[in-house]
Image (cartoon, rainbow, N blue to C red):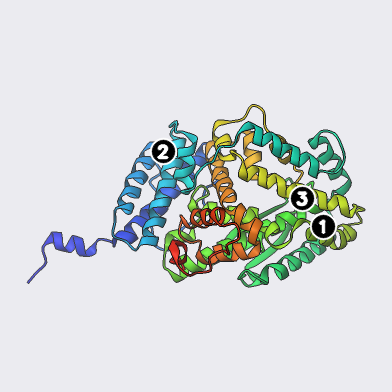
Amino acid sequence: MTRSSAEADRADAPAPAERLSGRLLALARAASRLAERDGDAPMLDAEPVGPHEPVREQLRAATVAAEAAALSAEASASDLEPLRRAFLAGHLRAVAAVASALAGAETPAERVVADLTGLPAARCEGATLVARDAALADALPGRGDVVERAEAWRRAARLPVGRPALWNELVLVTLAELRRRAAATVELPPPDVVEVALVRGPRPLARTRRLGDGRARLEVGIEAPATVVDLVRELARETWPGRATARWAVDRRLRVEAGWPEAGVLFSASPLAALVEGAASLALDAVMPPAEAARFAGAEVAARAGIGTGGADLEAMFRAASLVDALDARGDCATTLLEGSSEPTAGLRLASVACTAPSDAAAVVLSMRPVAQRLAACAAAAGRAALAPLVRRDGAAALAALLRVGLEPSAVATLCAASERSPRATVPRGSGGAASRAR
């Protein structure tokens, strides 16, 4: 008995999850190329590996948006395993939101943030922002305008530029201490997963590039106008327990162990990006509170660099740096990113002159970068806002728990909601609830 042509077609057709995964990767690549065409940065941190559908270069943004939205609805209504269904639907929805923005669609800011991340965009009243600006002014050393005070301190605490031997020593000492502290709570990749390269020229202080097969290169700009505070915070953000740690955990658990090829590529405005970038932004505070960071930076970084920063001022600047991130995360940053701000708050102004290395969100608001970059910053800001209550309370334990169970797009929101309802409750570690099923 021979099969009919229809039966043969059905037998040869890819499984629903495989088909949706392939289209997600193809549409994410198409959206990234459309963004680059408009002068934006790439939106993927790696090219997809394995079989996937080719990108049709002629796709228009509106076409990408329509297909991604339709596939998101299809994934949501499918009978796939719940976590895979949520992951595919959420990331297809994010691609649709980015492509719609590239096509010029006007969508309320709160809806855009929800579509990108699955997290709410909470607005902040003006009086609250004023109060937070006052708290920031109190945290900084000296008197007068916050930006002028920060700039004066930065001039006194700036690292010498262009000295490879010194920078190599400072980077290795800092990475060793960050890894020692993070390893006490967070599961870390092998140290050789991240290679370090010192680079010259007008580059960011620290940037991680994925090399494939779970490996990454940390590029440290030795001519960047950085302070001892910047160096410690940015290395934590990029490595232990920050971006490299989070990406390794997600890649291993979802792409390798669960067999989800779409998890091997980070789309920079998505639920996964909210988790990874949020964790990276809060990494230092999780393993080294300001007082401890100041002691380490004074004894091991400033002293080696020959910088005579006072311990009290160092601690004040680490506290101010943490407060800038908190202002950025807890205010209406995500909606401000989309709607613009004619009068940035002190926290945003301070970040813009790099009291700490500028937060993505603040830099984007003030520099008016292209659409996709603003949306990527929205995802990072939403992730910080969701993770901040957990990290403030439980530190590295919160990040460790999130890296174990935070694989479902809604897990961050679930854990954050539980944190706000029960301030003294411990972070879930894998028993019960939607988050634990993501293990």
Q: Which mark is residue 294?
A: 1
Residue 341 image point, x, y percent: 62, 30
Amino acid at pointer 3? Arg
Residue 270 circle label = none
Would you name the residue on which mark 3 appears? 319
Q: In this picture, is 400 found above or below 354?
A: below
Q: How many marks?
A: 3
Q: Which residue lies most toward the left here?
A: 1
Q: Earlier in the sequence, mark 2 or mark 3?
A: 2
The nearer-to-camera label among 2 and 3 is 3
Q: Decide: is 301 above or below 267.
A: below
Q: Quadrant of residue 303?
A: bottom right
Which residue is under mark 2?
61
Seen at 88% across and 55% down, the residue is 311
- Asked where in the image residue 202 lies, by quadrant, the reply is top right
Q: Of the residues under marks 3 and 1, which one precedes in the sequence? A: 1
Q: Secondary structure at mark 2?
A: helix
Residue most extreme to the top: 342
The local crowd at label 1, few if under 14, some if 14 to 19, many if 20 or more residues have their Cα within 10 Å, is: many
- Residue toward you, 196 or 96: 96
Residue at 54% in and 46% down: 379
**Residue 369 located left or right of residue 16:** right
Front tag of 1 and 2: 1
Vertical side of 418 occupied by 329: above or below:
above
The answer to whether residue 370 shows anywhere in this view is: no
- Using the image as rendered, state which of residue 328 and residue 223 is in the foreground: 328
Graded by Cα atoms within 10 Å as few (under 14), some (14 to 19) or many (20 or more), the crowding at tag 2 reads many
Q: Quadrant of the N terminus?
A: bottom left
The residues bearing labels 1 and 2 have C-alpha atoms spaced at a distance of 48 Å
Q: Secondary structure at mark 3?
A: helix
